[in-house]
Amino acid sequence: MRPPLARIPIGSPLQILLLACSFALTAYAGVRLLAGDWFGVALWFVGAALLHDLVLLPLYTVADRAVVRGLDAARRREWTLYVRVPAALSGLLLLVWFPLISGMVERRYRLVTGMSTDVFLARWLLITAALFGGSALLLVLRLRGTAKHRQPDAR
């Protein structure tokens, strides 16, 4: 019997090279990011972590539990992914584009680009509708496929 740490799992040389390159790129980005206002960046990072852990995580946990309870039947429980995936993607888009969707940076955006932020809310809503519509379509196709497999051959 060999000891548990007899062989440390090390990847291929290519994996090690890619990992070293990713660490180097991360270090470079960190140095460049922290060069200007390191305290502001650190404060933003800590604030974002606290906001996520203390506010957002409980909110989307409650929302997910509501979806699971709403689809309580054992067979319908697997339908939750058809709600979770589009909701997560839509939430991620909202998180990334929130300043433009909300119009909070309208003046600055117009000065820099010469364009308006009016279209961002409508486009985000359309993308969200398309995500949920596509997910519903996939669910319907999946249910039709399983219904065909369950029906015995009438011959």
Image (tube, grey):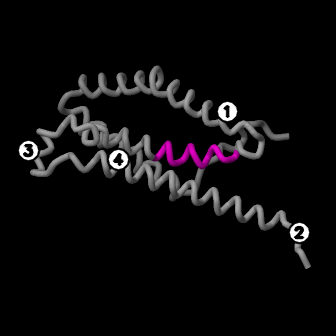
Instruction: Indicate left or right for 121 with 107 as reference.
Output: right
Start-end of magenta stretch: 78-89
What residue is disc 4 on?
A: 25
Real-space Cα separation, disc 3 to disc 4, in angstroms: 32 Å
Q: Which of marks 2 and 4 is in front?
A: 2
- The image position of residue 18, as x and y in percent, is 46, 54
Q: Which residue is drawn at 37% across and 38% down?
A: 95
Rounded to the nearest whole Å, what is the CA distance between mark 4 and mark 1? 44 Å
Amino acid type of disc 1?
Arg
> Are the residues flagged by discs 3 and 4 in contact, CB closer than 8 Å?
no
Q: Which of marks 1 and 2 is nearer the N terminus?
A: 1
**Residue at image location 72% in from the left, 40% down from the top:** 6
The secondary element bearing badge 1 is classed as helix
> Which mark identifies residue 69?
1
| Residue 49 lies within the magenta run | no
Q: Is residue 70 left or right of residue 36?
A: right
Amino acid type of the residue that numbered disc 3 sits on in the rendered structure:
Leu
Specify the farthest residue to the right. Answer: 155
Q: Which amino acid does label 2 sit on?
A: Pro
Is 44 drawn above or below residue 4 in the view shown? above
